[in-house]
Amino acid sequence: MMNPHVLLLGGNGRVARAMTRLMVSRSWRVTSVVRNPQHKEDILRLGANEAVQCDLRRIQTVEDASQLIEKHQPSCVVFAAGSFSSPYEIDRDAAQHFIQAACQADHVHQFLMISFPASRRHPAPWWSKQDIASYRAECETYPHIQEAKLQADECLISAARQRELRGGKIQAISLRPSWLLTSPPTGKVLLGKTPAVGQVSIDDVAAVAVSLLSRNDTNGWVDLVEGDMEIDRAVDALVENKVNSIEGEDVERMCKVKRLNA
């Protein structure tokens, strides 16, 4: 697999910055998109090939997102942006515009969304009663973020299906880490059928994201918490066992819902 050119949206976020360092260490090309132009120099010091200023709240249509994608011609798009204050503008609307634009661009072969395990409509079938209670508590505490991320995750499934129907293919990955820690990485995680709520270091999230993007056979929803399996081995097991955290959700309904500007 050739080294990708990654368009990294939300480039100044903690996960995105950690991803930048790892991708650069692998000689991947990184175009990092930041909201504040004052962050551009700092992003370039991390090793990014290019730092681009764009306020994602100004991405009002799929065409707006397409213009940025076509200008930079990435092979991979990563949506690592998020907003507690404007989740519907950023986590839902901007994300959906970039998802649809990427899935319409033949040169984009991978799309990775940073989401979280509570981004689902139904409790996961492998969860315990305590997990279900924790999931419901998260939904009640952060209802707008949960709904915004969920609509984006579902949009990615739908847009990838539409691309397949047109005869194309895209790796559509929603990486769904639980609560983020600033502690040093452990290099070990649990992927796939995880508890509803857990924790995981930011650097381990970044390492999982890069591991998923370093191969061409990863797809679907990937829930993530700290664990006891080395990261590349955990990704190997995820693929070999065909684990997809979307289990229990209505995929066909997702693909029938009309999306923004679709």
Image (cartoon, grey):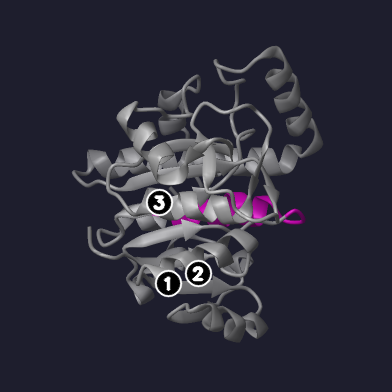
Q: Residue furthest top?
A: 129
Estimate the x, y position of residue 49 in percent, counting from the top left. Answer: 43, 80
Query: Decide: marks 2, 1 in contact (CB < 8 A)?
Result: yes
Estimate the x, y position of residue 132 in percent, counting from the top left. Answer: 69, 19
The total of numbered circles placed on residues is: 3
Q: Three-letter amino acid code at disc 3?
A: Ser
Say which of 129 and 190 sits in front.
190
User: Which label is found at residue 211?
Assistant: 3
Q: Can you see residue 261?
A: no
Residue depicted at x 59% and y 59%: 15
Q: Can you see residue 37?
A: yes
Estimate the x, y position of residue 160 in percent, counting from the top left. Answer: 35, 42
Q: Three-letter amino acid code at disc 1?
A: Val
Q: Per the image, is 236 magenta?
A: no
Alpha-carbon distance for marks 3 and 2?
Answer: 13 Å
In the image: residue 153, left or right of residue 14: left
Residue depicted at x 50% and y 44%: 175
Estimate the x, y position of residue 156 in percent, counting from the top left. Answer: 44, 43
Instruction: Write down the residue under mark 1.
Output: 24
Q: Three-letter amino acid code at disc 2?
A: Arg
| Residues drawn in magenta | 84-100
Estimate how packed mark 1 is, as few (under 14), some (14 to 19) or many (20 or more) residues with alpha carbons within 10 Å.
some
Instruction: Write down the residue under mark 2.
Output: 21
Q: Quadrant for the N terminus, please.
A: bottom left
